[in-house]
Amino acid sequence: MKIGLCWRGNVDFRVDPRRSIPPEALTPFASLERVRLFCLQKGTRADELPPELARKLENLGEEFDSGPDAFIDTAAMMMELDLVVTWDTSIGHLAGALGRPVWVALRHIAEWRWLDGRLDSPWYPTMRLFRCERGDNWGELFAQMADEIRIA
């Protein structure tokens, strides 16, 4: 299984510290067997990831999506993936628009566009929504996702 991961957006956006996912929350994905993980995150630093995740995550290189046509490389990569896992970011919207299977992690209190209490999106039929049950417990949420991948 090939899974693309994205955990943060534009670090210059004023609310990014409250909306991006701490990379250590993705650690449960490092223990998945028979899974290849691909980084859909631009500008990843080697030191920002937990070592066990950094060893398993395949980085697509500095030139990935660096040209004038934003998201061309990302869209092409998504077409080769079995699943995209992200949070409320453009990556999730792109995967949904392309009709790719995508799981979106949402804060306990998510933006209006995700509606209340839904596990799906009326705009993207291939999207599944995962919501933090208490606060923003990202670690618990990604452990749940990893468990679902294991039994699939």
Image (spheres, grey):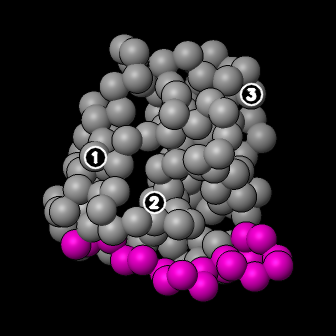
Residue 56 among those drawn in magenta: yes
| Label whose residue precedes the other's in the sequence (3 or 2) | 2
Question: How many marks are shown on the rendered structure?
Answer: 3
Mark 3 or 1: in front is: 1
User: For the point 77% across and 41% down, which residue is it?
Assistant: 123
Residues 50 and 14: in front is 14
**Residue 32 badge:** none
User: For the point 51% across and 34% down, which residue is it?
Assistant: 17
Mark 2 or 1: in front is: 1
Task: Give the amino acid type for the residue marked by disc 3 in the picture.
Answer: Arg
Which of the 4 quarters of the picture holds residue 59? bottom left
**Residue 24 badge:** 1
Task: Give the amino acid type for the residue marked by disc 1 in the picture.
Answer: Glu
In the rendered image, residue 102, in percent from the top left (x then y), is placed at 56, 53
User: For the point 82% across and 79% down, which residue is it?
Assistant: 68
User: For the point 60% across and 71% down, which residue is it?
Assistant: 78
In the rendered image, residue 37, in percent from the top left (x then y), is placed at 36, 69
**How far apart are the two marked residues, 3 and 1, measured between alpha carbons?**
27 Å
Element under label 3?
A: helix
Q: Which residue is mark 2?
A: 5
**How far apart are the two marked residues, 3 and 2, measured between alpha carbons?**
22 Å
Residue 109 vertical placement versus 87 (above, below):
above
| Label whose residue precedes the other's in the sequence (3 or 1) | 1
Indicate left or right for 82 with 16 as reference.
left
Q: Quadrant of the N terminus?
A: bottom left
Q: Which residue is mark 3?
A: 113
Task: Give the amino acid type for the residue marked by disc 2 in the picture.
Answer: Leu
Q: Residues within 10 Å of mark 3 (few under 14, many from 20)?
A: few
Residue that lies at the very extreme toward the right in this rendered image: 68
Indicate left or right for 81 with 71 as reference.
left
In the rendered image, residue 9, in percent from the top left (x then y), is placed at 60, 49
